[in-house]
Image: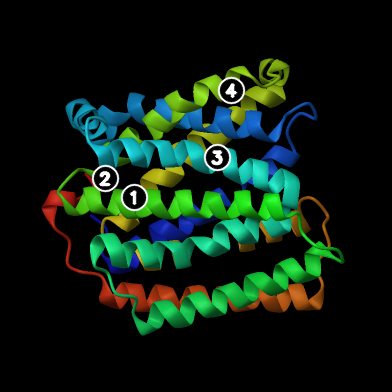
Amino acid sequence: MATGGRAVGAVLLAAALFGTTGTAQALGPDSTSTLGVGAARLVVGGLALLALLPLVGGRGGEVLALWRTPTGLVAGACTAAYQVCFFAGVDRAGVAVGTLAAIGSGPVLTGVLALLLLGERPGRAWLAATGVCLAGLALLVLVGSGSGGADPAGVGLSVAAGLAYAAYTVLAKQQLDRGHRPSSVMAAAFGLGGLLSLPLLATQPLGWVATAGGVALVAYLGLVTTTLAYLLFVRGLAVLAAGPVTTLVLAEPVVATALGVLVLDERLSAAGAVGAGLVLLGLLVQGLGASRAAPAPEGAVGAP
């Protein structure tokens, strides 16, 4: 299993992959819908995690056992709820504001839930890093959203997505602490989330999936930004506390912003660049603090 430094690297790489989803969708077929893309991503990614389970050291019996527990059921429901709330919130509030509300609220909500459910008390490094990251994200959004207020319902949906993400993270950490294998924890949550997303997927226009661009988009979002990214994510979560993990994932909007500038020709002002720099500074503080505070690896929760 990863040591502290490798665990931080795994979470940051996962966050970088998460950050490519918006650009990938923008480069995909014009006929896609946000909810259709989100549901397809989870269905493909979740089913792939279940199919690859024997290759990554997981156990099918363990997945079934998790599905029979309240923690496993809620974790799976949270993965599906995140997709629905996030894409619906971004659709109403806009990409910048919706992403800030969802991803930015994650560390705070995770810190609260981790304190209540896991007894994890936030350290000074987490508080400082999260504050710096949120300040940087606020700068990125304020310079990108322009004038006018955000849609309240969209912001509410995005915060609900942040709560679903926080709840999933804490529940997954709880399962890992109880000795479940990381790959089984991922497969249980995202496999169930994918199954729960099938009815939503059936309500969306899916003609774009039959095109070459549609196949490439679904394969990338499902296999790379979900299957691979969450296997990396859980390797870090098996070593690090839940709060620091969600702070590290704030790298996602920075990657998304950078790709928007480099690939989609979006403009980033000087204030936006300062905001991105603040997020990177916060990530550095959190990464160093988490690497030093990470406990020694234990075989019970180790990745194969």
Residue that mark 1 sits on: 234
Marks 2 and 1 close (CB-CB < 8 Å): yes
| Nearer the camera: disc 4 or disc 1 | 4
Residue located at (24% from left, 53% from top): 174
Residue located at (71% from left, 18% from top): 211
Q: Along the horizontal axis of the image, is 82 left or right of 123?
A: right
Say which amino acid is labelled 1.
Val
Say which amino acid is labelled 3.
Gln
* Element on which disc 1 rests: helix
Residue that mark 3 sits on: 83
Say which amino acid is labelled 4.
Leu
Q: Along the horizontal axis of the image, is 221 left or right of 230?
A: right
**Residue 113, position in %: x, y?**
35, 61
The Cα–Cα distance between marks 4 and 1, rounded to whole angstroms, is 26 Å
The Cα–Cα distance between marks 3 and 4, rounded to whole angstroms, is 11 Å
The Cα–Cα distance between marks 2 and 1, rounded to whole angstroms, is 6 Å
Residue 182's disc is 2
Tell me the quarter of the picture where residue 136 sits: bottom right
The Cα–Cα distance between marks 2 and 4, rounded to whole angstroms, is 27 Å
Query: In the orientation shown, which residue stands out farthest toward the left?
Result: 299
Q: Is residue 222 above or below residue 4?
A: above
Residue 201's disc is 4
Q: Is residue 272 above or below residue 33?
A: below
Choose the circle earlier in sequence order: 3 or 1: 3
